[in-house]
Image (cartoon, grey):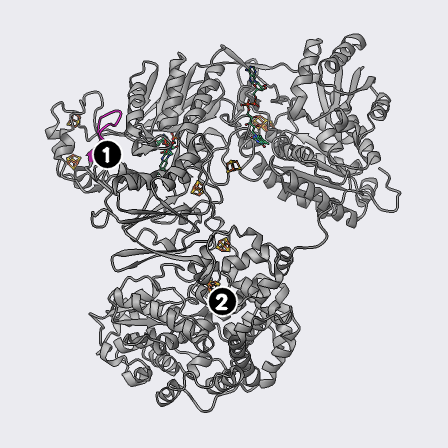
């Protein structure tokens, strides 16, 4: 993506679960709801599968923000995976702050298989939000230091 | 714990007997009340109906004064006043954006937390045992229809007091006097509130329905805890109804032996003496 | 060396209009490891699949990436094609350039650039894919059906008639469920018990069905084809083998004033009782909470009177264990509790309708009992307070349903129909009476349903008033119903007050109490209201997300008898399909433990929702214990990956979604 | 990025009100429960549910000119029972405010406005309502001099009407509240 154009185009990597959010994003597609092309979704079985290292790696590879989205609480395909994920995030957030990553760059949401509109609105919203935050650079500094 | 007393405008005028009976009862039951210094009108419905911020700022000043005077709770016997105080306070606690605007309007800081605001029933409810212990003239055999009107129980989420459709607290207090509370259907129906003058016919119509039902379910009198309800029900009765309208504080006062005169029992338009004898 | 083939699909115009497919194919050809890259108009068509197969054979591909629609759409199609060409199907991946790209973006340049990246991500992944083989598991060809309402009975009968064994568990003393309580049924008005009781008897006597009434599922473990179920048989206090069902005990029991659950509190029963005359099995239980013997040691009459000595006060709950291969959940519904409100669920009740303080305000099931020939009034419609026939009956629809304020925004779907039925039945029995129906909409979307409602209005003269009732209060002996006719305006705004003798509330259908606990035992999900969730709202309506567990009837959502029966037969067909082979195949997306690295902390065990982590002891040659390590039971593991993310020593990985694969995908986004 | 979704740029009346008051009348499904329980319907020109409908269809004019919004007694019966949690009574307040500002008050509301003005005027001057002065002011404003004349002497004798009120000491503080809230939304 051309980061040199006048307007900064953020790169956002999304980790989504197969059952809810991936399907919700599919629904946004079948409903032809338009949203910015800054998002790249990586499909996993469950948000419970997501390791903190995936997020760090995403930032390392130049992401300006990371989105994690799965099933609504109580609705997990695997009954409790997203619950474990949420418990881990509280700890993980601290780690991020420690690593110098602005927690506003790590976004969480719930999008169910029926919420195509929610997905498209979410991407609108976070793209605008991250554009405002500007490019993510501090991590590089830390890694190099 | 200092309890601020907020009589409100009606209790200074048309509802003088409500004020008298509350003060007399507070003394009899040893529940000290201190009038909030320099309180102002809550604005009633006229304010919030036409200017939202004014409707918040008027009650806010009184609450801010009470807090500044070291009071930790407010007793506001008038249902309309207590409703306005509670609703306004709930709104600024819920929406922090309003706090600044209100503080600017009243030129005073608002208390940080929630100041408990108690209506007439809540004032008496914790002291039922005290009332039973102090009983001098039990009202055994009297059938009373407890009338809550609108503002004691609504909006339910904001006032968070009793069940909005089938409230029970006033019946509990009334039962402590030995009276029997009848089951009737108009306990939370509106009496026409502020339309006494501007749409008198409405009030007459509404009060008629309420009193008819109280009568048909066998009540000897209607018990109220709001000066507006009282004024409407007392003064706008259909011809020949002659239903005594008694404040809860008067009922309890009588039962614990406060002199009728001190309770202002002679001040009603529809005479109450025969029913209470 | 990896030899990857990339196949870019135009999907007709769907992708081709926004994404420059030839350009994507050309750029993909340059990715390291890609040896073949083409684009084509319809890749999923026969010739399209042919392109893939041909390339696999000719270019000796080790991996395939199809850039097309969502993998949820066609992954299985292309994997099958690969398998046919001799490539392990799990070496095929899809890049979603339609739903996630061409359909949601407008700028052709941006969309094309994104498509290229999405292809690179999958190329990076597929390079690290490994051949996987479907897991085969044996199947126990016996089914468990939970709940003996019409849905459970139907499912059990269909499976049994298919030649497979069924264990049917019902928590009440008799099967039959709510249908047994109904008087007549829409849209044909046939007698409910007449059509139901033969099925109940058939279920109880079927050689392939083992019936456990007064029983509940205690615990469930295992997985599709291999569940272990523990069932609690509640103490009946009656030896069901000895009891002949003569009924003498109930006749003599001095405790006669217990509100009957079956008659919805409108009739009374004894402490030793069968719920209703046609109960199956027709053998009593003692309700210990109301029996004098259990309350204070006195009485004992039933034991003395029983000619065969079947009464046994010392019985205790017992447990049995069953192995089953599939489970059908058919626990049905209950009605919204308008009498007490539902404060436990944070739902305010209908105080404005009297919270059940008025005896003559009843719900639909109570009306069914009043109208039923087997009911407490022998089928005469008499009001509960004074036993007189009501002259004016008001029916109120959508009570608790379609009401956000009470937390239940759904439509209960059956009440529009049964209220029309009630109005009809009432008019058939009290000719001079008037039936008023307050409604918001009339939802009668079924075969012959709307005609049925029209008949209630046109032929039987039910007065339908469009508006919700605001309040009911008592005046004299009457119930004044205050509503509005929103189709009228004018002075008074269409306000309506009806002095009714009887009010019937069409209260919401709710899932059974305790459904959440049962769902957790079964590891199946439920929606925000507690209805059990199907795997897909349209295409897999009888399956759950847990393989081998199926749904039937009103436990999944409000439904009437035809729908409940249809779904039950659907579930039975799924079960029979499952039982048609001796083994079954599962997707091999499972976790693996690297036991040499595992430190035995067993955090993984705590997070695994399927109890798939086992503990294994490692011993040296002398048999001394060296270590306890984790092991994944591949039969149980569903591949969620929670254990992988939890393991601090990185000792577990997930096939198909390994850490290496995900890292390489992220890397592909550079 | 070119992916701005094109929603209609103009907000509907209902959307505008929702943004300003937090009350979204699009939730109203016209069940009529508010109307059924409203004690003031006989005095109204539109029922409460019809007012919701007027706003839904964007008839701002009819809503602001209605007599209904003034005859609403703020009894909150409707808001308490609405199955869609529409705050109807609170919405009436918002409409009244806008009706006044837009000078679209229904002629039938004359007496009600006179009362509100007299009431607020009293507070503005004295910080508290002194009933005799308030009633006198109202009667002049409303040109309604003779109703209730029979009640006044009785009330006076019973000690319910006091000739002199007790104003607040800090009258400026109250006057300031009126000034500072006057322009507010
Ligand atoms: C007033 C009224 C009138 C109706 N009239 C009609 C009509 O005329 N026509 C029509 O088609 N439909 C009608 N219905 C709908 C009909 O009742 C249902 O569609 C039908 O009963 C659903 O059957 P079911 O087997 O799914 O559930 P249920 O009948 O509820 O059966 C569920 C069974 O499971 C048992 N159970 C529950 N939990 C457990 C557990 N944990 N373990 C073991 N057992 C358990 C219950 O005890 C019960 O026996 C009416 C409904 C009502 C409320
Ligand atoms: C405008 C519209 C929108 C809809 N939207 C939705 C929706 O959003 N969601 C939803 O759930 N449902 C929707 N539906 C309903 C949905 O279309 C049907 O429920 C569904 O298609 C029914 O499937 P079917 O297989 O029973 O019938 P059909 O789809 O009609 O299939 C019948 C097949 O049988 C073939 N056939 C017919 N006669 C013969 C014969 N004699 N010999 C051999 N073959 C024969 C036909 O050619 C056809 O291929 C919609 C319907 C309409 C009209
Ligand atoms: S008396 Fe004995 S045999 Fe007869 S029904 Fe009762 S328990 Fe059964
Ligand atoms: S022992 Fe219990 S069940 Fe038996 S007759 Fe006595 S009360 Fe009835
Ligand atoms: S079926 Fe009819 S009565 Fe029942 S909730 Fe739906 S619309 Fe209301
Ligand atoms: S015919 Fe179709 S559009 Fe008409 S009510 Fe039935 S489902 Fe709705
Ligand atoms: S979490 Fe990892 S280290 Fe701990 S027991 Fe499980 S596999 Fe072994
Ligand atoms: S992936 Fe791990 S946590 Fe998930 S089911 Fe398998 S073993 Fe359990
Ligand atoms: S009660 Fe609520 S939903 Fe019903 S008509 Fe009134 S505002 Fe609309
Ligand atoms: S608040 Fe107003 S609209 Fe609502 S019920 Fe009361 S008078 Fe009617």
Q: Nearer the viewer, residue B192 or C644?
A: B192
Magenta-colored segment: predominant secondary structure? loop
Q: Is residue C456 left or right of residue C33?
A: left
> Any mark on residue C277, and which?
none
- The x and y percentages for residue A43 are 68, 30
- The x and y percentages for residue B253 are 30, 77
Q: Identify the residue shown where x is 25% and y is 24%.
A: C281
Q: Is residue C280 magenta?
A: yes
Q: Quadrant of the C terminus of chain C?
A: top right
Q: Nearer the viewer, residue C456 or A35?
A: C456
Q: Is residue D127 left or right of residue A91?
A: left
> Any mark on residue D72, and which?
2
Note whether C180 is above or below B38 in the view shown: above
Q: Is residue C185 left or right of residue C390?
A: right
Judged from the image, the quadrant occupied by ligand 4 is top left
| Real-space Cα separation, disc 2 to disc 1, in angstroms | 50 Å
Q: Where are the magenta residues, as a range?
A: C272-287
**Residue extending furthest bottom?**
D163
Q: Secondary structure at mark 1?
A: loop
Label 2 is found on which chain of the structure?
D
The residue singled out by tag 1 in the image is C373
Q: Quadrant of the N terminus of chain C?
A: top right
Residue C373 seen: yes
Please tell me in which quadrant of the rendered image residue C21 appears: top right
Asked if both marks, 2 and 1, belong to the same chain, the answer given is: no
Q: Is residue C210 magenta?
A: no
Label 1 is found on which chain of the structure?
C
Q: Nearer the viewer, residue D4 or A20?
A: D4
């Amino acid at each position: 993506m051309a980061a040199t154009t006048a307007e900064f185009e953020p790169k956002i990597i999304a980790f989504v679960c197969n059952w809810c959010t991936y399907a919700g994003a599919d629904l946004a597609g079948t409903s032809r709801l338009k949203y910015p092309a800054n998002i790249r979704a990586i499909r996993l079985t469950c948000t419970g599968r997501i390791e903190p290292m995936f997020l760090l790696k995403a930032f390392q590879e130049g992401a300006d923000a990371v989105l994690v989205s799965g099933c609504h609480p109580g609705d997990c395909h695997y009954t409790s995976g997203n619950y474990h994920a949420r418990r881990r995030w509280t700890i993980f957030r601290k780690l991020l702050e420690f690593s110098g990553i602005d927690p506003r760059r790590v976004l969480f949401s719930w999008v169910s298989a029926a919420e195509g509109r929610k997905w498209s609105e979410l991407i609108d919203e976070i793209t605008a939000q991250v554009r405002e935050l500007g490019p993510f650079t501090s991590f590089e500094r830390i890694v190099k230091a | 714990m200092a309890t601020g007393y907020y009589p409100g405008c009606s209790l200074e005028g048309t509802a003088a007997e409500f004020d008298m009976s509350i003060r007399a009862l507070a003394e009899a039951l040893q529940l000290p009340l201190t009038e909030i210094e320099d309180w102002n009108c809550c604005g009633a419905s006229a304010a919030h109906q036409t200017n939202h911020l004014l409707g918040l700022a008027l009650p806010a000043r009184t609450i801010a004064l009470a807090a500044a005077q070291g009071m930790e709770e407010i007793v506001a016997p008038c249902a309309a006043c207590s409703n306005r105080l509670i609703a306004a306070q709930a709104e600024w606690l819920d929406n922090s954006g309003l706090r600044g605007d209100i503080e600017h309007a009243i030129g005073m800081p608002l208390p940080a937390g929630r100041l408990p605001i108690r209506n007439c029933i809540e004032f008496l409810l914790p002291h039922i045992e005290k009332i039973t212990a102090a009983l001098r003239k039990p009202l055994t055999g009297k059938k009373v229809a407890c009338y809550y009107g609108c503002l004691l129980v609504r909006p339910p989420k904001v006032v968070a007091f009793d069940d909005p459709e089938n409230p029970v607290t006033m019946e509990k207090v009334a039962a402590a006097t030995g009276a029997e509370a009848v089951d009737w259907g108009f306990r939370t129906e509106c009496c026409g509130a502020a339309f006494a003058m501007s749409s008198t016919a409405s009030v007459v119509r509404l009060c008629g329905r309420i009193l008819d039902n109280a009568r048909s379910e066998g009540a000897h009198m209607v018990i109220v805890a709001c000066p507006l309800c009282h004024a409407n029900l007392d003064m706008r009765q259909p011809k020949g109804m002659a239903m005594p309208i008694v404040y809860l504080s008067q009922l309890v006062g009588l039962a614990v032996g406060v002199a009728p005169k001190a309770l202002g029992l002679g001040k009603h338009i529809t005479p109450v003496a025969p029913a209470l004898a | 060396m990896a030899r990857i083939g990339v196949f870019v699909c135009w999907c007709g115009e769907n992708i081709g209009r926004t994404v420059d497919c030839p350009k994507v194919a050309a750029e993909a050809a340059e990715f390291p490891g890609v040896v073949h890259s083409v684009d084509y108009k319809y890749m999923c068509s026969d010739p399209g699949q042919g392109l893939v197969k041909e390339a696999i054979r000719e270019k000796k591909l080790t991996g395939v990436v199809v850039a097309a629609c969502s993998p949820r759409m066609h992954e299985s199609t292309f994997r099958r094609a690969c398998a046919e060409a001799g490539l392990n199907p799990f070496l095929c991946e899809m890049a979603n350039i339609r739903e996630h790209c061409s359909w949601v973006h407008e700028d052709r340049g941006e969309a094309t650039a994104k498509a290229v990246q999405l292809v690179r991500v999958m190329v990076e992944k597929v390079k690290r894919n490994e051949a996987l083989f479907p897991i085969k598991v044996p199947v126990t060809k016996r089914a468990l059906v939970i709940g003996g309402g019409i849905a459970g009975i139907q499912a059990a009968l269909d499976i049994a008639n298919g030649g497979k064994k069924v264990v049917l568990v019902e928590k009440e003393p008799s099967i039959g469920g709510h249908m047994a309580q109904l008087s007549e049924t829409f849209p044909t008005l046939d007698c409910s018990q007449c059509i139901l009781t033969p099925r109940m008897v058939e279920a109880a006597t079927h050689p392939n069905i083992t019936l456990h009434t007064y029983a509940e599922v205690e615990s469930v473990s295992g997985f599709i084809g291999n569940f272990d179920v523990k069932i609690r048989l509640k103490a009946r206090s009656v030896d069901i083998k000895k009891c002949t069902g003569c009924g003498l005990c109930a006749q003599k029991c001095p405790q006669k004033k217990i509100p009957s659950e079956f008659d919805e509190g409108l009739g009374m029963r004894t402490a030793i009782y069968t719920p209703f005359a046609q109960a199956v099995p027709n053998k009593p239980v003692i309700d210990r909470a109301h029996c004098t013997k259990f309350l204070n040691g006195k009485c004992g009459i039933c034991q003395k009177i029983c000619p065969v000595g079947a009464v046994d006060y010392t019985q205790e709950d017992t447990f049995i264990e069953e192995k089953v291969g599939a489970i059908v959940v058919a626990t049905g519904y209950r009605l919204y509790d308008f009498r007490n409100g539902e404060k436990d669920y944070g739902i305010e009740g209908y105080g404005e309708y009297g919270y059940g303080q008025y005896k003559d305000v009843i719900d639909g099931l109570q009306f069914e009992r009043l109208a039923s020939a087997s009911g407490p009034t022998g089928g005469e419609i008499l009001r509960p307070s004074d036993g007189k026939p009501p002259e004016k009956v008001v029916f109120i629809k959508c009570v608790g349903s379609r009401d956000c304020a009470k937390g239940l925004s759904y439509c209960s779907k059956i009440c529009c129909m049964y209220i029309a039925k009630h109005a009809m039945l009432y008019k058939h029995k009290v000719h001079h009476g008037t039936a008023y129906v307050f409604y918001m909409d009339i939802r009668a979307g079924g075969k012959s349903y709307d005609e049925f409602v029209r008949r209630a209005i046109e032929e039987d003269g039910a007065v339908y008033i469009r508006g919700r009732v605001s309040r009911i209060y008592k005046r004299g002996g009457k119930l004044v119903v205050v509503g509005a006719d929103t189709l009228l305006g004018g002075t008074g705004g269409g306000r309506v007050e009806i002095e009714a003798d009887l009010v019937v509330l069409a209260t919401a259908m709710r899932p059974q109490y305790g459904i959440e606990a049962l769902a957790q035992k079964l590891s199946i999900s439920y929606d925000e209201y507690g209805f059990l969730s199907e795997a897909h709202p349209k295409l897999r309506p009888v399956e759950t997300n847990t393989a081998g567990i199926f749904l039937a009837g009103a436990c999944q959502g409000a439904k009437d008898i035809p729908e409940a029966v249809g779904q039950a037969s659907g579930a039975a067909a799924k079960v029979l399909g499952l039982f048609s082979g001796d083994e079954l195949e599962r997707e091999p997306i499972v976790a693996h433990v690297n036991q040499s690295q595992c430190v035995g902390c067993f955090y993984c065990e705590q997070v695994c929702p399927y109890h798939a982590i086992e503990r294994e002891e490692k011993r040296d040659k002398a048999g001394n214990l060296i270590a306890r390590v984790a092991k994944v039971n591949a039969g149980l593991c569903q591949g969620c990956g929670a254990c992988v993310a939890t393991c601090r020593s990185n000792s577990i990985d997930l096939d198909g979604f390994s850490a290496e694969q995900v890292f390489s995908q992220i890397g592909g986004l550079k | 990025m070119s992916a701005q979704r094109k929603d209609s740029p103009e907000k509907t009346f209902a959307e505008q009100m929702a943004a300003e008051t937090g009350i979204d009348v699009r939730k109203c499904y016209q069940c009529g429960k508010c109307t059924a329980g409203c004690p003031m319907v006989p005095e109204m020109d539109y029922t409460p549910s019809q007012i919701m409908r007027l706003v839904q269809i964007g008839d701002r004019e009819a809503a602001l000119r209605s007599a209904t919004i003034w005859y609403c007694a703020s009894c909150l019966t409707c808001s308490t029972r609405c199955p869609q949690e529409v705050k109807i009574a609170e919405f009436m307040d918002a409409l009244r405010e806008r009706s006044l500002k837009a000078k679209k008050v229904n002629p039938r509301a004359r007496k009600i406005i006179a009362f509100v003005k007299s009431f607020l005027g009293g507070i503005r001057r004295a910080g508290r309502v002194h009933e005799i002065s308030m009633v006198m002011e109202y009667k002049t404003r409303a040109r309604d001099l003779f109703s209730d004349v029979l009640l006044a002497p009785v009330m006076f004798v019973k000690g319910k009407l006091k000739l002199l009120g007790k104003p607040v000491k800090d009258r400026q503080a109250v006057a300031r509240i009126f000034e500072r809230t006057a322009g507010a939304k």
